């Protein structure tokens, strides 16, 4: 398979942008978790997760308007710069002692990362063919994960010496080179253009109409919903154990940072080695079906032997697979689709749907007062449903492509 020089350079540039973005995200993720737990306690995490639901939709709507008016490359640049402004503003509020700013930064961290990273993937899905994506999606994730690894371990080293709040400035700073790299990628590969029917958001700025009219896109959304149920309950179980084991804020921040650094290493191995081999030689359906099977097993172990380390292991395995094999395989589903499906409906599914599923799960958990092993049981049930959805979805993909 032949890759043009500009395609390779564009892929490297967008991977570098993702690496800077994810490096900065490790700072805001560890800090926002730690500060919110310190301000309101882990028991209130479901409520702040619920607040993510409207926050993400508002950002997607704003992005959709920018996309309609300025095009894909400038919409990405503007959302990156606005994110810097919000993070710095929240940092200043936290310094002044406003506890609610810890909730703001938690909600915003959940929104900005998916909004921007999905714009990167929209670019990738519009630049590569399905066959090219099978070879490059894994390494793309791997190059991006180098930022996660670096950021995670930097958090572990710097949290106690600089203080948790200060690390937010590292997140803001990382968005500047990310914006430069992503803009360079568009300059190299060219900007994907909508059809006449799609120009200036004629079919809707958010892509909701496009999404609702496509059974295929609805199934991708159902896939995201089930994966995020698993993610949410494993996250809450893990954070509950952390609150007990690490009561000091900066120590807790360092532990979380080191956890995500370790996660980055595990994900990188899967991204650079396992994902390219699986995506090239194994049927897409078998690759996808293997993932919920693994999670079913790790959740069963967590039920039998509940501890900080079994919870950390189950959550780490989920995230490592999510960042590598699952992501590389899931993005291929978008390649045969239209501009609005790739740039608008994708945000509805992978940003709003991703976070709404997490928020909805959190709301139900909070209302029902679920704790302990109930989290693992929910994850196991969701993994079974996940398997059924992916079986149907891969059949639809094969029909679109005319092959596996």
Image (cartoon, rainbow, N blue to C red):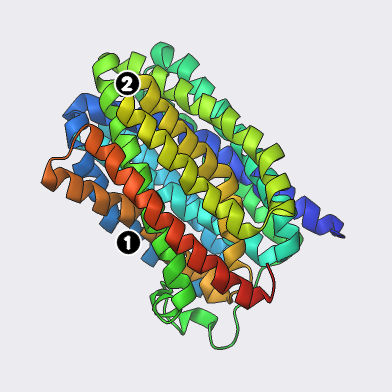
Q: Residue at x 54, y 34 (%)?
A: 23
Outermost residue, bottom direction?
197
| Tally of numbered discs | 2
Q: Position of residue 189 (x, y in %)?
A: 74, 62
Q: Is residue 53 above or below residue 157?
A: below
Q: Residue at x 52, y 73 (%)?
A: 341
Q: Nearer the viewer, residue 151 or 86?
A: 151
Q: Looking at the rendering, which quadrant does residue 84 occupy?
A: top left
Q: Is residue 9 visible?
A: yes
**Earlier sequence position, callout 1 versus callout 2:** 1
Quarter of the image with the C terminus in it: bottom right
Q: Position of residue 30 (x, y in %)?
A: 39, 29
Q: Residue at x 39, y 63 (%)?
A: 222
Q: Callout 2 environment at 10 Å: few (<14), some (14 to 19), or many (20+)?
A: some
Q: Looking at the rendering, which quadrant does residue 40 occupy?
A: top left
| Residue at the disc numbered 2 | 307
Q: Callout 1 environment at 10 Å: few (<14), some (14 to 19), or many (20+)?
A: few
The circle on residue 58 is 1
Q: Position of residue 128 (x, y in %)?
A: 72, 63
Q: Is residue 184 shown left or right of residue 227?
A: right
Q: Is residue 155 above or below residue 357?
A: above
Q: Nearer the viewer, residue 201 or 352?
A: 352
Q: Residue at x 23, y 49 (%)?
A: 50
Q: Looking at the rendering, which quadrant does residue 403 occupy?
A: bottom right
């Amino acid at each position: 398979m032949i890759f043009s020089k500009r395609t390779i350079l564009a892929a490297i540039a967008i991977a570098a942008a993702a690496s800077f973005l994810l490096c900065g995200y490790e700072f805001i993720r560890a800090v926002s978790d730690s500060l919110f737990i310190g301000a309101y306690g882990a028991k209130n995490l479901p409520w702040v997760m619920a607040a993510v639901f409207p926050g993400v939709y508002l950002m997607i709507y704003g992005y959709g308007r920018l996309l309609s008016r300025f095009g894909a490359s400038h919409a990405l640049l503007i959302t990156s710069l606005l994110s810097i402004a919000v993070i710095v503003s929240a940092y200043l509020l936290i310094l002044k002692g406003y506890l609610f700013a810890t909730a703001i930064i938690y909600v915003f961290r959940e929104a900005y990362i998916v909004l921007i990273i999905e714009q990167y993937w929209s670019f990738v899905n519009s630049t590569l063919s399905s066959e090219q994506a099978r070879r490059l999606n894994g390494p793309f994730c791997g190059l991006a994960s180098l930022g996660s690894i670096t950021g995670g371990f930097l958090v572990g080293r710097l949290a106690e010496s600089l203080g948790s709040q200060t690390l937010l400035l590292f997140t803001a700073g990382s968005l500047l080179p990310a914006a430069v790299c992503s803009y360079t990628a568009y300059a190299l590969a060219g900007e994907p253009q909508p059809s006449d029917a799609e120009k200036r958001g004629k079919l809707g700025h958010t892509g909701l109409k496009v999404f609702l009219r496509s059974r295929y896109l609805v199934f991708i959304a159902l896939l995201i919903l089930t994966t995020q149920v698993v993610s949410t309950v494993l996250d809450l179980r893990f954070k509950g154990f952390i609150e007990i084991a690490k009561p000091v804020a900066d120590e807790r921040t360092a532990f979380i940072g080191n956890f995500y650094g370790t996660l980055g290493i595990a994900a990188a191995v899967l991204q650079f080695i396992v994902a390219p081999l699986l995506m090239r030689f194994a049927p897409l359906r078998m690759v996808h079906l293997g993932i919920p099977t693994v999670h079913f097993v790790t959740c069963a172990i967590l039920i039998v032997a509940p501890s900080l380390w079994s919870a950390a292991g189950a959550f780490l395995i989920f995230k490592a697979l999510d960042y590598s094999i699952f992501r590389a395989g899931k993005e291929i589903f978008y390649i045969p689709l239209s501009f609005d499906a790739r740039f608008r409906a994708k945000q509805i599914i992978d940003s709003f749907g991703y976070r709404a599923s997490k928020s909805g799960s959190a709301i139900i958990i909070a209302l029902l007062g679920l704790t302990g092993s109930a989290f693992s049981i929910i994850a196991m049930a969701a993994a079974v449903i996940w398997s059924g959805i992916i079986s149907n979805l891969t059949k639809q993909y094969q029909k679109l492509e005319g092959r596996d």
